[in-house]
């Protein structure tokens, strides 16, 4: 299928409304049939649970055009499972895994002309999210919810090439023990905004959060997990019950062990040992890996041997291998790649979808 006439090389990492998005409402204990809507707006009560008590969670994943022209997504089943975990922790109804995967397929297929071509450096970013939609004035879970999934084409995270970043040790805590740090809740990101804006004002790209209980162990940044490479070539990543289980990080662990033959350690990482690592990176869906060149600990700098000019050699191999798997130039482990087929004869809802009567719209797949 032909692509839209877009300057793919000029895209930034920002939201652009697409033709359709997926919407399903939860009411009386049942998820309604999902529909593809042309309307990007929401109509909800001023007292909706999401507005009063931040009852919302989300996911992030991408669709790619591979070297052989297929449109694929990368491990969306893990996004479905992680979102289910988030819902349970926030007392929200779980959106079924197969429904989640169906929503991903339909939104990509419904906007397939907007999936950037192979080699452009751009991708299609997918944002599934759920929120409490019914009025709640007492502190309790909402009774009704809405699941939505929209897409937007985005440019490469590093438009001018991948350069190591500078981060600081943050005085604020990202998550408490036994809190919500392990789920992808909107409230986690809201509380990180002050710290990241402050870091940028001070000239740093990101924050390094330490564990709230002892402030001796590395956790994560506001939106990415850490990976480290030791001087003898081991892959090390922090283990904690209060960090988000990044799908990119879990995939990199497999790449490190099975593709690059590295020893992999997922364990507690004490800040005191960070100075002894050879390479450091942040990993997540948006950038895959952001190399870290130095860490500022209240005026004292930790500079990694890999430097501030380019990715360290092992980090570069990890990045190239994982992106090669995503783009189809390297064979993927079984189940990692989900191919998207075009959808035809799509009936679309044009009205705002606060509530859509069940059975109004059916999507027919060829």
Image (spheres, rainbow, N blue to C red):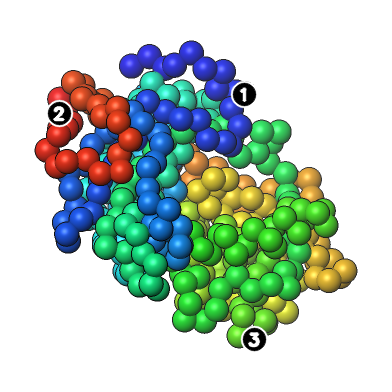
For mark 1, what is the residue?
10
Residue found at x 46% / y 30%: 17
Instruction: Give the farthest residue toward the right.
Output: 299
Q: Earlier in the sequence, mark 3 or mark 2?
A: 3
Q: Count neighbours of disc 2 (C-alpha within 10 A) and say few if under 14, some if 14 to 19, many if 20 or more.
A: few
For mark 2, what is the residue?
364
Image position, residue 192 (x, y; %): 62, 62
Horizontal arrangement in the rendering, residue 274 relative to residue 66 (left or right): right
Horizontal arrangement in the rendering, residue 277 relative to residue 116 (left or right): right
Observer-nearest of 52 and 17: 52
Q: Circle 3 — which element?
A: loop
Q: How far is the residue under mark 3 from the one under mark 2?
A: 55 Å
Image position, residue 251 (x, y; %): 44, 55
Q: How far is the residue under mark 2 from the one under mark 1?
A: 34 Å
Residue found at x 22% / y 40%: 356
Residue found at x 30% / y 39%: 353
Question: How many circles with numbers are drawn on the protein?
Answer: 3
């Amino acid at each position: 299928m032909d692509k839209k006439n877009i300057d793919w090389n000029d895209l930034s990492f920002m939201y652009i409304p697409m033709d359709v998005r997926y919407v399903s409402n939860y009411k009386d204990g049942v998820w309604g049939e999902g529909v593809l809507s042309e309307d990007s707006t929401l109509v909800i009560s001023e007292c909706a649970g999401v507005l009063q008590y931040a009852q919302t969670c989300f996911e992030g994943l991408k669709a790619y055009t591979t070297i052989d022209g297929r449109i694929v997504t990368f491990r969306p089943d893990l996004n479905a499972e992680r979102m289910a975990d988030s819902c349970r922790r926030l007392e929200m109804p779980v959106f079924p895994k197969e429904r989640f995967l169906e929503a991903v397929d339909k939104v990509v297929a419904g906007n397939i002309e907007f999936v950037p071509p192979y080699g452009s450096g751009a991708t299609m970013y997918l944002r599934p999210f759920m929120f409490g939609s019914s009025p709640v004035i007492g502190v309790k879970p909402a009774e009704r919810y809405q699941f939505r999934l929209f897409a937007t084409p985005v440019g490469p995270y590093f438009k001018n090439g991948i350069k190591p970043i500078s981060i600081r040790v943050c005085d604020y805590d990202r998550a408490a023990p036994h809190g919500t740090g392990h789920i992808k809740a909107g409230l986690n990101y809201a509380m990180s905004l002050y710290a990241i804006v402050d870091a940028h004002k001070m000239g740093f790209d990101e924050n390094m959060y330490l564990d709230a209980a002892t402030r001796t162990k590395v956790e994560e940044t506001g939106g990415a997990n850490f990976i480290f490479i030791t001087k003898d070539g081991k892959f090390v990543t922090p283990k904690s019950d209060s960090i988000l289980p990044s799908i990119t990080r879990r995939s990199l662990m497999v790449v490190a062990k099975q593709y690059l033959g590295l020893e992999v350690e997922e364990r507690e990482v004490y800040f005191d040992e960070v100075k002894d690592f050879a390479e450091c990176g942040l990993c997540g869906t948006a950038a895959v890996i952001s190399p870290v060149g130095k860490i500022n600990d209240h005026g004292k700098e930790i500079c990694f041997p890999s430097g501030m000019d380019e990715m360290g050699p092992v980090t570069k191999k990890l990045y190239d291998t994982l992106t090669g798997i995503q783009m189809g130039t390297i064979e993927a482990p079984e189940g990692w790649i989900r191919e998207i087929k075009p959808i035809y004869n799509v009936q679309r809802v044009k009205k705002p979808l606060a509530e859509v009567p069940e059975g109004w719209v059916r999507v027919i797949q060829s």
